[in-house]
Amino acid sequence: MKRNAMIYHLLTFRLDQLWFPLAFWALFAIIALLRGESYVFDTARSYLGAVVPLMAGIMAAYALLDDPALELRFATPTCAASLLAGRLGLVLAVQATCALGFQAFALLFKADLSPLGNTLDLQLSWLVPTLSLMALACLGSLLGTQNMAGALLVGLVWLVQLVARGWFAANQGRYLLVFMGALMPDHPALRLNQVSLLLTSLVFTLISWLLLKRQERYI
């Protein structure tokens, strides 16, 4: 059954959820080339820390309810957890490929990514905010029973935190600032920030799972 569910997810995977992030990948690669080798790090940091999480959030907002055969899917014995894991797993896989690919691109042009920390810190700088915005988007879509609700929620949070990141970093909001790992890797509250974001993501995902079990809300 799990194998059949994964095959279904792959067969119904919308191509715009592939070319959309790839288009942004190409755009930032071109920007890095035009700005020159000395700016590749800045471009990579912006892409990894801000663009990848935003793209993941938007894609996650449309991952579950944007299925023309959703009612038929609910009629099958597939559990909510499997549906949630399959849809969000594909989104994460696409964004992880883009993130790792851009790191390889940056290293190809001899960009020094060490300011973001060691290898683990580098991966956490994009993975933590990506998981956070994906969980938020999924929850927003299910609460609002429409894709746009999750996408708007993620876009609003992303924009507010990006514009007011200095205020968030200096106040209690530091623990929920999604950009800290990439833009403020030396912040003393970074570890607590990452733990807080991951726990928040877990809570949002659990709530999404409970909401998705109430299938009558989305038919």
Image (cartoon, rainbow, N blue to C red):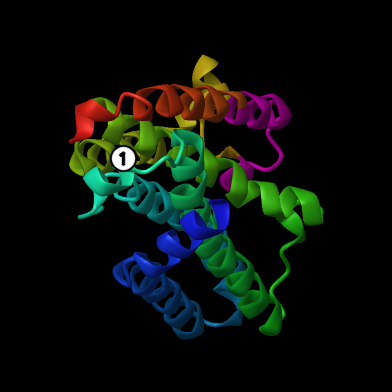
Give the residue at x 47% y 48%: 88
Using the image, determine if residue 117 lies above or below residue 173: below
Q: Is residue 204 magenta?
A: no
Please report the residue visible at 36 percent of the width from the left and 53 percent of the height from the top: 59
Residue type at mark 1 is Phe
Circle 1 sits in a helix, a strand or a loop, which is it?
helix
Q: Residue furthest top?
A: 172
Evaluate whether residue 167 shows in this view: no
Q: Is residue 105 above or below residue 87?
A: below
Q: Is 121 positioned to the left or the right of 27 in the image?
A: right
- Counting from the top left corner in percent of width and height, residue 152 is at 23, 39
Q: Nearer the viewer, residue 8 or 204?
A: 8
Q: Residues within 10 Å of mark 1 (few under 14, many from 20)?
A: some
> Which residue is tagged 1?
74
Q: Position of residue 20 (x, y in %)?
A: 33, 69
Q: Quadrant of residue 106?
A: bottom right
Tell me the quarter of the picture where residue 211 sits. Answer: top left
Q: Which residues are magenta?
A: 181-198
Image quarter of residue 170: top right
Residue 122 falls left or right of residue 130: right
